[in-house]
Amino acid sequence: MRWWCRSSKPLPVTWSPPSPACWPWTGQRRSLRCGASGLAEAAISDARRRNMAAIRGTNTKPELVLRRGLHAMGLRYRLHSRSLPGKPDLVFPGRRTVIFVNGCFWHGHACHLFKWPKTRADFWRTKIGGNIVRDQKVRAALAAVGWRVLDVWECALKGRERQPVDDVLQQCVAFLESDVATASIGHPQTVTISDDA
Ligand SMILES: [Zn+2]
Protein backbone atom coordinates (compact mmCIF):
# COMPACT_ATOMS: atom_id res chain seq x y z
CA MET A 1 0.00 0.00 0.00
CA ARG A 2 2.61 2.48 -1.13
CA TRP A 3 0.23 5.41 -1.30
CA TRP A 4 0.18 5.82 2.47
CA CYS A 5 2.59 8.26 4.05
CA ARG A 6 4.87 6.06 6.09
CA SER A 7 6.94 8.79 7.66
CA SER A 8 6.88 12.55 7.97
CA LYS A 9 10.64 12.67 8.57
CA PRO A 10 12.64 14.53 5.90
CA LEU A 11 14.98 12.48 3.77
CA PRO A 12 18.59 12.52 4.99
CA VAL A 13 20.85 15.09 3.39
CA THR A 14 23.02 12.32 1.99
CA TRP A 15 20.08 10.70 0.20
CA SER A 16 20.77 9.68 -3.38
CA PRO A 17 18.45 8.08 -5.94
CA PRO A 18 18.18 4.31 -5.60
CA SER A 19 19.26 2.06 -8.40
CA PRO A 20 16.52 0.87 -10.79
CA ALA A 21 16.67 -2.48 -9.01
CA CYS A 22 15.13 -0.85 -5.93
CA TRP A 23 11.73 0.08 -7.36
CA PRO A 24 9.72 -1.04 -4.33
CA TRP A 25 11.71 1.40 -2.28
CA THR A 26 10.94 4.28 -4.64
CA GLY A 27 7.29 3.65 -3.90
CA GLN A 28 7.97 5.15 -0.48
CA ARG A 29 9.62 8.12 -2.10
CA ARG A 30 6.57 8.73 -4.28
CA SER A 31 4.40 8.59 -1.19
CA LEU A 32 5.88 11.91 -0.05
CA ARG A 33 3.13 13.47 -2.15
CA CYS A 34 0.53 11.95 0.12
CA GLY A 35 -1.89 14.41 1.63
CA ALA A 36 -1.92 12.68 4.99
CA SER A 37 1.05 14.74 6.11
CA GLY A 38 1.22 18.51 6.23
CA LEU A 39 4.99 18.24 6.05
CA ALA A 40 4.80 16.19 2.88
CA GLU A 41 2.44 18.73 1.29
CA ALA A 42 4.87 21.53 2.11
CA ALA A 43 7.80 19.51 0.73
CA ILE A 44 6.60 19.91 -2.86
CA SER A 45 8.60 22.78 -4.29
CA ASP A 46 6.74 25.20 -6.54
CA ALA A 47 9.00 24.37 -9.48
CA ARG A 48 8.44 20.64 -9.05
CA ARG A 49 4.71 21.15 -8.67
CA ARG A 50 4.46 23.22 -11.85
CA ASN A 51 6.44 20.64 -13.78
CA MET A 52 4.30 17.75 -12.55
CA ALA A 53 1.12 19.72 -13.14
CA ALA A 54 2.08 20.48 -16.72
CA ILE A 55 3.03 16.91 -17.52
CA ARG A 56 0.35 14.91 -15.77
CA GLY A 57 -2.47 17.22 -14.76
CA THR A 58 -1.85 16.41 -11.10
CA ASN A 59 -0.90 18.78 -8.29
CA THR A 60 -2.43 21.70 -10.16
CA LYS A 61 -3.01 24.88 -8.19
CA PRO A 62 -6.79 24.34 -7.74
CA GLU A 63 -6.07 20.77 -6.61
CA LEU A 64 -3.52 21.96 -4.04
CA VAL A 65 -5.90 24.64 -2.74
CA LEU A 66 -8.54 21.98 -2.21
CA ARG A 67 -6.14 19.48 -0.66
CA ARG A 68 -4.65 21.95 1.78
CA GLY A 69 -8.07 23.26 2.78
CA LEU A 70 -9.52 19.80 3.39
CA HIS A 71 -6.37 18.74 5.24
CA ALA A 72 -6.64 21.81 7.48
CA MET A 73 -10.23 20.78 8.25
CA GLY A 74 -8.96 17.46 9.57
CA LEU A 75 -9.86 15.31 6.56
CA ARG A 76 -7.38 12.66 5.46
CA TYR A 77 -7.15 11.12 2.03
CA ARG A 78 -4.99 9.25 -0.41
CA LEU A 79 -3.71 10.85 -3.59
CA HIS A 80 -3.95 9.70 -7.22
CA SER A 81 -4.70 6.11 -6.36
CA ARG A 82 -3.68 3.92 -9.29
CA SER A 83 -5.86 1.11 -8.01
CA LEU A 84 -9.08 2.91 -8.93
CA PRO A 85 -10.49 3.76 -12.38
CA GLY A 86 -9.32 7.19 -13.53
CA LYS A 87 -6.66 7.52 -10.79
CA PRO A 88 -8.81 9.91 -8.71
CA ASP A 89 -7.08 13.00 -7.32
CA LEU A 90 -8.33 12.49 -3.75
CA VAL A 91 -9.56 9.19 -2.33
CA PHE A 92 -11.44 8.80 0.96
CA PRO A 93 -11.44 5.01 1.43
CA GLY A 94 -13.55 4.91 4.59
CA ARG A 95 -16.29 6.89 2.88
CA ARG A 96 -15.83 5.04 -0.42
CA THR A 97 -15.70 8.45 -2.05
CA VAL A 98 -13.37 10.12 -4.53
CA ILE A 99 -12.88 13.70 -5.67
CA PHE A 100 -11.65 14.70 -9.11
CA VAL A 101 -10.35 18.23 -9.66
CA ASN A 102 -10.94 18.78 -13.37
CA GLY A 103 -9.00 21.24 -15.50
CA CYS A 104 -11.65 22.97 -17.60
CA PHE A 105 -9.68 22.87 -20.85
CA TRP A 106 -8.52 19.25 -20.80
CA HIS A 107 -11.86 17.92 -19.62
CA GLY A 108 -13.90 20.04 -22.03
CA HIS A 109 -15.93 22.02 -19.51
CA ALA A 110 -18.57 24.26 -21.12
CA CYS A 111 -17.41 27.34 -19.22
CA HIS A 112 -15.54 30.61 -19.79
CA LEU A 113 -12.15 28.94 -19.16
CA PHE A 114 -12.58 26.66 -22.17
CA LYS A 115 -11.59 27.96 -25.61
CA TRP A 116 -11.03 25.81 -28.65
CA PRO A 117 -7.45 26.31 -29.92
CA LYS A 118 -7.35 28.20 -33.22
CA THR A 119 -5.06 25.69 -34.89
CA ARG A 120 -5.16 21.89 -35.37
CA ALA A 121 -8.95 21.86 -34.90
CA ASP A 122 -9.34 18.17 -35.76
CA PHE A 123 -6.61 17.15 -33.35
CA TRP A 124 -8.16 19.05 -30.46
CA ARG A 125 -11.66 17.87 -31.25
CA THR A 126 -10.46 14.28 -31.10
CA LYS A 127 -8.35 14.89 -28.00
CA ILE A 128 -10.92 16.70 -25.90
CA GLY A 129 -13.75 14.48 -27.14
CA GLY A 130 -11.72 11.44 -26.12
CA ASN A 131 -11.13 12.89 -22.67
CA ILE A 132 -14.85 13.54 -22.18
CA VAL A 133 -15.75 9.98 -23.18
CA ARG A 134 -13.03 8.57 -20.92
CA ASP A 135 -14.32 10.67 -17.98
CA GLN A 136 -17.81 9.26 -18.50
CA LYS A 137 -16.49 5.69 -18.58
CA VAL A 138 -14.40 6.24 -15.45
CA ARG A 139 -17.39 7.51 -13.50
CA ALA A 140 -19.52 4.60 -14.65
CA ALA A 141 -16.77 2.17 -13.62
CA LEU A 142 -16.47 3.77 -10.18
CA ALA A 143 -20.23 3.74 -9.67
CA ALA A 144 -20.36 0.08 -10.69
CA VAL A 145 -18.13 -0.85 -7.77
CA GLY A 146 -19.91 1.39 -5.28
CA TRP A 147 -17.73 4.51 -5.20
CA ARG A 148 -19.24 7.98 -4.91
CA VAL A 149 -17.77 10.73 -7.10
CA LEU A 150 -17.48 14.48 -6.61
CA ASP A 151 -16.22 16.55 -9.53
CA VAL A 152 -14.72 19.92 -8.65
CA TRP A 153 -14.25 22.05 -11.74
CA GLU A 154 -11.27 24.36 -12.03
CA CYS A 155 -13.55 27.37 -12.67
CA ALA A 156 -15.06 26.94 -9.19
CA LEU A 157 -11.68 27.96 -7.81
CA LYS A 158 -10.22 30.12 -10.56
CA GLY A 159 -11.35 32.91 -12.87
CA ARG A 160 -14.30 35.28 -12.82
CA GLU A 161 -16.82 32.59 -11.80
CA ARG A 162 -14.78 31.31 -8.88
CA GLN A 163 -16.45 30.76 -5.55
CA PRO A 164 -14.95 31.59 -2.15
CA VAL A 165 -12.59 28.75 -1.22
CA ASP A 166 -14.39 28.21 2.07
CA ASP A 167 -17.67 27.73 0.20
CA VAL A 168 -16.10 25.10 -2.05
CA LEU A 169 -14.58 23.32 0.94
CA GLN A 170 -17.92 23.30 2.74
CA GLN A 171 -19.60 21.80 -0.33
CA CYS A 172 -16.94 19.09 -0.39
CA VAL A 173 -17.49 18.29 3.27
CA ALA A 174 -21.28 18.25 2.78
CA PHE A 175 -20.87 15.76 -0.07
CA LEU A 176 -18.46 13.59 1.91
CA GLU A 177 -20.91 13.42 4.80
CA SER A 178 -23.89 12.68 2.55
CA ASP A 179 -24.89 9.51 0.78
CA VAL A 180 -25.34 11.24 -2.60
CA ALA A 181 -23.84 9.16 -5.42
CA THR A 182 -22.47 11.94 -7.63
CA ALA A 183 -22.20 15.72 -7.51
CA SER A 184 -20.37 18.54 -9.21
CA ILE A 185 -19.05 21.86 -7.92
CA GLY A 186 -19.35 23.99 -11.01
CA HIS A 187 -22.05 23.02 -13.51
CA PRO A 188 -21.64 19.52 -15.01
CA GLN A 189 -22.01 20.35 -18.71
CA THR A 190 -19.17 19.61 -21.11
CA VAL A 191 -18.62 21.10 -24.56
CA THR A 192 -20.40 19.61 -27.56
CA ILE A 193 -17.73 18.21 -29.83
CA SER A 194 -19.65 18.28 -33.11
CA ASP A 195 -20.90 21.87 -32.85
CA ASP A 196 -18.25 23.86 -31.03
CA ALA A 197 -15.00 23.09 -32.77
ZN1 LIG B 1 -14.99 25.27 -15.97
Image (spheres, grey):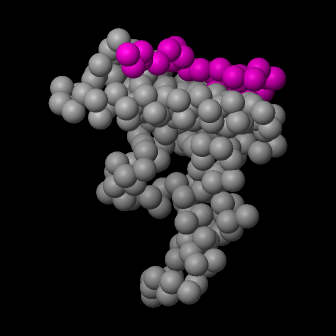
**Residue 19 drawn at (x, y percent):** 50, 87
**Residue 2 drawn at (x, y percent):** 67, 65
8 or 159: nearer the eye?
Answer: 159
Number of labelled discs? 0
Q: Is residue 173 magenta?
A: yes
Q: Residue at x 41, y 40 (%)?
A: 61
92 or 68: nearer the eye?
Answer: 92
Q: Is residue 75 visible?
A: no
Q: Is residue 42 magenta?
A: no
Give the quadrant of residue 147.
Answer: top right
Q: Left or right: 189 with respect to 124?
A: right
In the displayed structure, 121 sits above or below 74; it is above
Q: Split into 4 quadrants, where in the image is the C terminus?
A: top left
Q: Left or right: 164 with respect to 72?
A: left
**Magenta stretch bounds:** 171-194
Q: Residue at x 43, y 22 (%)?
A: 109
Q: Split into 4 quadrants, where in the image is the N terminus?
A: bottom right
In the displayed structure, 31 sits above or below 130; it is below
Q: Is residue 85 visible?
A: yes
Give the quadrant of residue 67.
Answer: top right
63 or 85: nearer the eye?
Answer: 85
Q: Residue at x 50, y 14 (%)?
A: 189
In the displayed structure, 99 sits above or below 77; it is above
**Residue 167 drawn at (x, y percent):** 56, 20
Q: Residue at x 78, y 27 (%)?
A: 177
**Residue 152 drawn at (x, y percent):** 54, 27
146 or 194: nearer the eye?
Answer: 194
